[in-house]
Image (cartoon, rainbow, N blue to C red):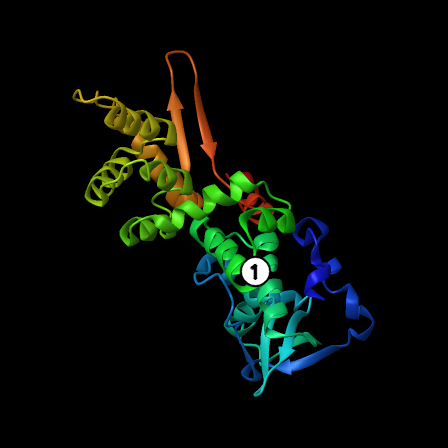
Amino acid sequence: MARGLGKGLGRGLDALFQDNKGDEVVEQLKLDDIRPNPYQPRHEFDEMALAELAESIKLHGILQPIIVKKSVKGYDIVAGERRYRASKLAGKTDIPAIVKSMTDKQMMEFAIIENLQRENLNALEEAKSYQLLMDHLSLTQVEAADRLGKSRPYIANMLRLLNLPEEIKQLINDKKLSGAHGRTLLGLKNEADMMTIAKQVIKESWSVRQLEQYVKSLTSSPEQPKKVPAKPKFLVKHEQSLKQHLGTNVEISKSRKKGKIAIEFTSEEEFNRLISLLERV
């Protein structure tokens, strides 16, 4: 089955399961008999989003069954770990599920693709997903890009994040830095310099463009680099307020006559969540 995935990411998850679609029977399984996918590339789940999903489950139940694989003891989740976690949070004891027959390799691949399609992965989790797929299926960057409907340079750029120091990786996981900030910091060879500048980026709310200019000045000229102009304090204050309220990266820029507020989202799910929050204002 795995060989037939092709550009599975672009075709949708339904296409991934078409080989045995005829045996789809929804069963009610005990949550205690189910365990998270051991190949799950995502390790952190948005607690607020899980709480919202749990409230929806209390009101409407599970609208889409999860996908599981029979294991030696109970079942392993193939797709739908958010629904599984939210159901436990909602106090449910069972969950609708479809049991699929597949190998561990197929389960790993489906789990990665399901995350890349449906979940709001941060940049590092996305990079780890690509590396897992390449390692377990012995794929080159070109083959992985073709399989996922991405360009090879995109895959290569994402994988570069895995070379960052652990402290900076944590800052990306904590959404204090973006993946683009992390890739730019890789232009510095010294890890201590990376960390020092990363702290300055966070403190002064530098945009990626500001960081690129600063790193370029450090690496292209022996002269003392020009200090990036600090953003006005009132803009920094409002940026931080919006970041906390919206739960995502927000950048405010201003010239003499006009300004711009940029709100970052990385999936349709997050986009809809942000629109819902903004409509309440």
Q: Quadrant of residue 99?
A: bottom right
State whether residue 147 appears in this view.
Answer: yes
Q: Position of residue 186 (x, y in %)?
A: 33, 40
Residue at coordinates 26% horizontally, 28% vertically from top-left? 219
Asked whether, in this view, residue 276 is left or right of residue 195, the answer is right
Q: Quadrant of residue 228?
A: top left
User: Which residue extends farthest left?
Assistant: 224
Q: Is residue 44 above or below residue 99?
A: above
State whether residue 58 appears in this view.
Answer: no
Q: Nearer the viewer, residue 240 or 265?
A: 265
For the N terminus, the quadrant is bottom right
Q: Position of residue 32 (x, y in %)?
A: 54, 83
Residue at coordinates 41% horizontally, 11% vertically from top-left? 257
Residue denoted by label 1: 112
Q: Is residue 264 above or below residue 257?
A: below
Asked whether, in this view, residue 129 is left or right of residue 234, the answer is right
Q: Nearer the viewer, residue 17 or 264?
A: 17
Q: Secondary structure at mark 1?
A: helix
Say what amino acid the circle numbered 1 marks. Ile
Q: Position of residue 192 (x, y in %)?
A: 19, 44
